[in-house]
Amino acid sequence: KPHGLWFPVDVSTSAQCTLGGMAGNNSCGSRSIAYGNMVHNVVAIDALLADGTGARFGPEAAMDGAPARVRALCESLRAIGARERDEIAIRVPRVLRRVGGYNLDVFHPMSERPYTADGSVNYAHLLVGSEGTLAWTRAITLALAPLPTHRTLGVVNFPTLYRAMECARHIVGLAPSAVELVDRTMIDLARGNPAFRPVIEAALIGRPGAILLTEFTGDDGQAPRRRLADLVALMGDLGLPGSVVPMTDAGAQKALWDVRKAGLNIMMSMKGDGKPVSFIEDCAVPLPHLAEYVERLTAVFAKHGTRGTWYAHASVGTLHVRPILDMRRGDAAKMRSIAEEASALVRAFKGAYSGEHGDGLVRSEWVSWQFGPRLTAAFERVKDLFDPDGLMRLYKEAGARYFTA
């Protein structure tokens, strides 16, 4: 901050997370629409392979001086990328939030946002999101961004969650730095907390079904205010005049963002035996399909006698949705059915089943569903090239068993 810079992968767990962990699962944060994910902000990674070979993974042009083992590894990786070019084009979801499998599309970028500005290959980007299965990270070189000088916040109040999701893609057209959802459940829970009540009530008009926190930034103090005015005009054009609460005071903005960052804790304060359960929490779909995805997933929940809680990154089609289930009284079967039906929806909308939080042990079974047999086999080959004896896999599984026990 004294240098006018910041690291813009602004995750809600910023008080607890580590940079290594953020690289491991390719963290995203509220402002990824403006700054990209972790992978877009990593310049290089100094890593150790399972056999002890050390190297700095970075731009392809800088890999010529790497150890012979690493140069051979990079050559094999590039050959896989070339061989699977068509499959990458067919199978890799074209959404910003997608962290499943390995980032083989570094060789043929498919995302809405390329990994590098010029489309060149950076081998560090293959390690980002690998969840500790390819190499140990010793150091990370990060790309910093200028700290925004001015911010404004427009809180858009909607009669229903569906209407909020329907309007999100139009709001994104105004080039905001963040568009974050808070649903009716979270609003009510925040209202029930004395510390959060005055903050959340200052952002509300009546009793909305959902709100979108829409932030604009700029070095020119007038530019964010002009875009805030554009937001007000846009909502009028969309049939929702008088729906925006403008916030230009920095203190008021921070207080409301703190409520949004506390979203998970707020949700878990829900009283009763049923609790929001995380297992389809970060599916991502293209913005044009977001409203229909929400509507159809809500119908899935209703079919199983429950409802979902919703919040987070409307700007990039990733909602933290948690069905309310009582896992002590037989709802595990519902959990499985909901997961299968949600996966079918994500596939229909050409989205990503693991949009933000990685595959892990819980969602490894969905990797082949998402990417198909050819790319799944390619991922296995990548794993074998980095760790031919499977030592890091065994280490990871042993650790998972230990912490589960």
Image: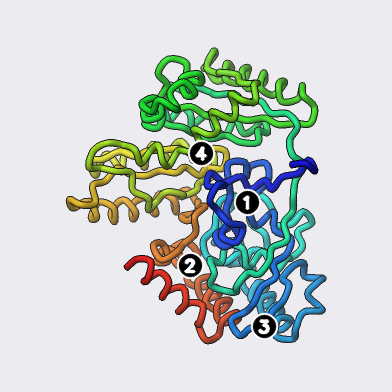
The label on residue 261 is 4
Mark 1 in CB contact with mark 4 (< 8 angstroms): no
The foreground one among 127 and 90 is 127
Looking at this view, name the residue that lies furthest to the left: 329
The label on residue 372 is 2
Label 4: how many Cα within 10 Å (few below 14, some 14–19, many 20+): some
- Residue at 67 percent across and 83 percent down: it is 53
Mark 1 in CB contact with mark 2 (< 8 angstroms): no
Q: Position of residue 255 (x, y in %)?
A: 55, 28
Quarter the C terminus occupies: bottom left
Q: Is residue 186 left or right of residue 62?
A: left
The label on residue 37 is 1
The label on residue 53 is 3
The label on residue 287 is none
Q: State how far apart marks 1 and 4 are (Cα).
A: 17 Å
Q: Position of residue 403 (x, y in %)?
A: 38, 66
- Residue at 56 percent across and 42 percent down: it is 316
